Image (cartoon, rainbow, N blue to C red):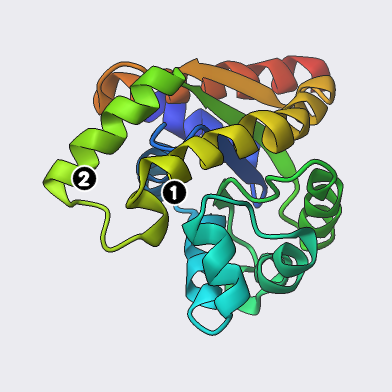
Amino acid sequence: MEQNISAIKNWLGTGSINIFGLPFSGKDTVGIRLAEDLGAKFLSSGLILRHAAEQDPELAKEMKNGFLADTNKFMDNILPYLKRQDLEGLPLVLSSVGRWEGEEYSVIEAAENANHPIKAVVLLNISEAEAKKRWGVAKTLADRGDREDDKESAALDQRMNEFIEKTMPVIETYQKRGLLVSVPAMADRETVYKKVIEELTVKAHQIEREII
C-alpha cells in the first residue's frame, strides 16, 4: 500500500480530495487516516459548522434536526478555511465540503484559487439500512461525542433525506467532471480504506496517462 500512497501523493500535489457519503458511511474515519498517510490537512465541514453552531442558535437548531446549514452560512463558515495561510503548500482531505446542490461550484472555485484544486471526490457507498444500524451501534458505544444530530432517529432520517435530495446532485456534478471515485463501504474499516487507496491510485495513474 505504501507504493500506492506514494503515487497518490505525487499526483495530488497541493490539491484536495473531497469525501461524501450517507451519515455513518465513514467519511471522517477514512478522511483522517487518508490525511495522515498523505501528509495532508483534514477539514470536516460538519466539525466546523458544529463549532459555529455554538454561537448560532438558529444553526444549532437546524443541525440538531438533521437539516443542512443554509448556503450563506456554509459560505461564511467553511470556504474561508480553504485559503488559510497555515494550509498553504499542503494537500487537503475534505469531509463533505459543499453538500447542497450549487455549493460545489463555489468549492471548486475557492479550492482552485487557494491552490488546492479538487483532484478527486470519493463517495463512500452504504445503504440507508446500514446507516441506521451503525447509528444504533454508535449510540450504544457513545463513541461520537455528544452530537445533537445523533440523538434522535428522526434527525438521522432527515439527514439521509438531505443527502439524497441535496447532496446527490452535487456528486453528480463531480461525476460529470470525471472526478468521482465510488467505493463500496459496507465492509470493515480496513477493507474500505484499502479500497479507497486502490481507487485513488487508479485515478492517479489515469491522469498520468492522459498527460502523457
Numbered disc 2: secondary structure: helix
Task: Look at 71% across and 72% down and name the residue there.
Answer: 80
**Disc 1 designates what residue?**
35
Q: Quadrant of the N terminus?
A: top left
Which quadrant of the structure image shows residue 192? Answer: top left
Residue 109, given in percent of the width and then of the height, sits at 86, 53
Task: Look at 57% across and 49% down and name the residue there.
Answer: 94
In the foreground, 139 or 82: 139
Residue 42: tell me if it is visible: no
**Disc 2 designates what residue?**
139
Residues marked 1 and 2 touching at CB (< 8 Å): no
Vertical arrangement, residue 48 with respect to residue 45, above or below: below
Task: Look at 58% across and 61% down and name the residue there.
Answer: 62
**Three-letter residue code for mark 1:** Ala
Residue 128 vs residue 76: left or right? left
Task: Look at 19% across and 51% down and name the residue there.
Answer: 143
Vertical arrangement, residue 202 with respect to residue 193, above or below: above
Which quadrant of the structure image shows residue 106? Answer: bottom right
Which quadrant of the structure image shows residue 114? Answer: bottom right
Residue 12, given in percent of the width and then of the height, sits at 63, 40
Q: Quadrant of the C terminus?
A: top right
In the foreground, 26 or 155: 155
**Three-letter residue code for mark 2:** Lys
Numbered disc 1: secondary structure: helix
Vertical arrangement, residue 103 with respect to residue 64, above or below: above
- Mark 2, Cα crowd under 10 Å, few <14 / some 14-19 / many 20+, is some
Residue 6: tell me if it is visible: yes
Which mark, residue 159?
Answer: none
Vertical arrangement, residue 143 with respect to residue 182, above or below: below
Residue 153, given in percent of the width and then of the height, sits at 37, 40
Q: Closer to the camera: disc 1 or disc 2?
A: 2
